[in-house]
Structure formats: C-alpha cells, structure tokens
Image (spheres, rainbow, N blue to C red):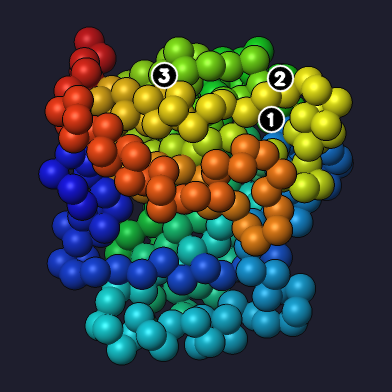
C-alpha cells in the first residue's frame, strides 16, 4: 500500500485482520470462447495455454495442489485463499460449480475463494450457489477488458459491456466481491478509450480492478495481427499515464489489484518494455508522486 493507491493487501487486511495469500489452483476448467460454444479462437489476446500452473493436466487434484502450495503461507500465519485463475471457472452447468465449491470448502484452513470467470458464465442460480458457500470471502475476477462493444467484437470477447454490468450487479447484490479485468492498448483503442472503460467500471459496484497493458503473446490471434503489421502496442509512457489517470478516476474503496500485466516466461512478443514489470511499477509510483495524484481525485459518484 502506498498512501496514493488502495491495494488488495490492504483490502484483505480489512477482511481477514492479517495478511492473506492467494494460492493458485488449477481446476481444469474450460472456456466457452475456446471450446466451440462461442468460438474456438478465443479472445484475440489470449494465449491458448491459459495462465495457470497446468497442475490439473499433470494429474494433481485440488487437494494435492493445496497441500503442495500452502506450506510457506501457513508458516507465516497468513489467511489462505484458493485462487482459480485460468479459463472460466463458473462455466458449465450449476452442478459442476456446486461440486467444485464442495471440493474447495473442504480444503484445510481455507478462508476465501477467488474465481476467474466471464460475465456470460454467471447466472442467478450460480450466484446463489457462490453466495451460499460457507466461506469467509468470495471474490469473482471477471473479464471486461473494454466497455466499448465495438472493441469487444474486434477482440472476439463474445459478450457485451452490458453483460458485464448485469453480472456485476447480480453478484454484488448477493454479497460477492467483484474484481474487473481491464486492458489498456487494445486494438483500435488509445488512452481515452481505456479511461472511458475505467469510468464505466467506477460507476458499478466493483470491489477491485486489475489494470493490464495489452501484451502480444505467442500463440494468440494478436500475435498474427502484430506480425502482419496490423497492431502496435501502446508506448510505455502512454501506459504509465493511462494507469495514473485511471487511479484518479477510481473510487477510493476499490482495490487496485494490479497495475500492469505479468507475462509468463517465454510468451512475450511485444512490447519489449512489458518485461520490465518492476520498472513500470516504479514509473507509475513516481508519476503519481510527481503529479500528486491520489486514488479517487477524479472520481464522481454516479447520481
Ligand atoms: S481470455 Fe479468458 S475468456 Fe478469453 S478465450 Fe482466453 S480463457 Fe477464454
């Protein structure tokens, strides 16, 4: 936590009264934008290998992964949260989600759940299952990326901004925390379009945001577009400016859980500056300091 930005660590301390650790687990989930239900190509920026540990494919169940990965955080006395990031973890029939939740709440000493998903993989029945799970804290990490429907079509998201708003309100009404994934520098978008997305999310009942620079990663549709000269990533300075202005637009209570993307080893094609994750964070902190920007400075509550 810096005084200028409300972080996830600070939000977790308020919930659990101490540090908390998200333990990355792989439930072998799928995605309707990959399995053919919506498309087989996936989102334009998506690496077909997903962003997870791959432990499910190697035959490790959730309990085995949990036992393997929780020891250091246990020693430090941290609150333990199961973190299912890859693909869309609420996809499929409600029975699948119910079985997944049963497995998760049986993990020893679990105090919270974070599930990555898509707005079109949530409905009232699944929200009710999530809200009824006997667990201290449930967080849904939901991809929006852009609030501009033309961009969502361009990047083959397969849902609209209104779908995201509907799912967010439904989840928040049920007492679930929602974290929105947003991307700066998507094809056809610059800083102003990204800030329009931030304003859209700031007016919704979200508990957190993850701000990402768009990466061209190996195996994605964007990599082909980039190779053909059809896409140029944002410049580093532009991204730093975009994040600082986004922070000013967000309500002070919303946790800024990420300020830049974290490319997996070997996957980054462009921009080269995205590999300097710590350097970018320093640039953002320095810019906030230089311009005396604090989270919420430009936030106006919706009427
Ligand atoms: S980014 Fe997420 S929603 Fe899009 S194709 Fe990849 S796994 Fe599916």
Are there few (<14), some (14-19), or many (20+) residues within 10 Å of tag 3?
Answer: many
User: Which residue is pictured at 69% across the width and 30% down the height?
Assistant: 157
**C-alpha separation, residue under disc 1 versus residue under disc 3:** 19 Å
Q: Position of residue 270 (x, y in %)?
A: 67, 39
Label 1 beta carbon within 8 A of ligand 1: yes
Q: Is residue 136 visible?
A: yes
Q: Secondary structure at mark 2?
A: helix
Q: Is residue 95 visible?
A: no
Name the residue carrying label 1: 157
Q: How many marks?
A: 3
Are there few (<14), some (14-19), or many (20+) residues within 10 Å of tag 1?
Answer: many
Of labels 3 and 2, the one closer to you:
3
**In the shown orientation, is residue 227 left or right of residue 71?**
right
Q: Position of residue 200 (x, y in %)?
A: 40, 19
Q: Secondary structure at mark 1?
A: loop
Q: Is residue 269 above or below residue 264?
A: above
Label 2 beta carbon within 8 A of ligand 1: no
Q: Is residue 80 above or below residue 272?
A: below
Name the residue carrying label 2: 153
User: Which residue is pictured at 86% across the width and 26% down the height?
Assistant: 228
**C-alpha separation, residue under disc 3 versus residue under disc 2:** 19 Å
**C-alpha separation, residue under disc 1 versus residue under disc 2:** 6 Å
**Quadrant in which ligand 1 is drawn:** top right
Q: Position of residue 30 (x, y in %)?
A: 73, 54
Tags 3 and 2 in contact by the CB under 8 Å rule? no
Quadrant of the image occupied by residue 120: top right
Quadrant of the image occupied by residue 206: top left
Name the residue carrying label 3: 195
Location of the C terminus by quadrant is top left
Q: Position of residue 90 (x, y in %)?
A: 60, 51
Foreground pick, 221 / 252: 221
Foreground pick, 113 / 284: 284
């Amino acid at each position: 936590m810096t005084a200028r930005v409300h972080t996830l660590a600070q939000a977790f301390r308020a919930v659990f009264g101490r540090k908390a650790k998200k333990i990355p687990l792989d439930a072998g989930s799928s995605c309707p934008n990959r399995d053919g239900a919506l498309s087989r190509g996936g989102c334009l920026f998506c690496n077909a290998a997903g962003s997870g540990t791959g432990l499910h494919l190697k035959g490790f169940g959730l309990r085995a992964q949990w036992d393997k990965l929780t020891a250091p955080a246990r020693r430090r006395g941290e609150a333990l949260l199961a973190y299912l990031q890859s693909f869309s973890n609420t996809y499929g029939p409600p029975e699948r989600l119910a079985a997944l939740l049963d497995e998760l709440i049986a993990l020893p000493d679990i105090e919270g759940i974070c599930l990555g998903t898509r707005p079109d993989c949530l409905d009232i029945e699944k929200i009710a299952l999530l809200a009824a799970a006997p667990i201290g804290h449930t967080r849904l990490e939901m991809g929006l990326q852009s609030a501009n429907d033309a961009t969502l079509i361009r990047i083959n998201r397969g849902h609209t901004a209104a779908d995201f708003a509907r799912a967010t309100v439904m989840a928040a009404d049920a007492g679930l925390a929602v974290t929105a994934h947003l991307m700066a520098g998507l094809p056809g978008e610059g800083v102003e379009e990204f800030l329009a997305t931030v304003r859209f999310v700031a007016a919704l009942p979200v508990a957190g945001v993850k701000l990402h620079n768009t990466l061209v990663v190996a195996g994605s549709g964007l990599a082909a577009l980039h190779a053909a000269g059809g896409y140029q990533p944002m410049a580093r300075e532009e991204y730093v400016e975009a994040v600082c202005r986004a922070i000013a637009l967000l309500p002070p209570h919303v946790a800024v859980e990420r300020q830049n993307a974290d490319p997996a080893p070997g996957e980054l094609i462009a921009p080269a500056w995205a590999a300097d994750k710590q350097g970018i964070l320093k640039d953002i902190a320095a810019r906030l300091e230089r311009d005396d920007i604090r989270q919420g400075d430009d936030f106006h509550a919706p009427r």
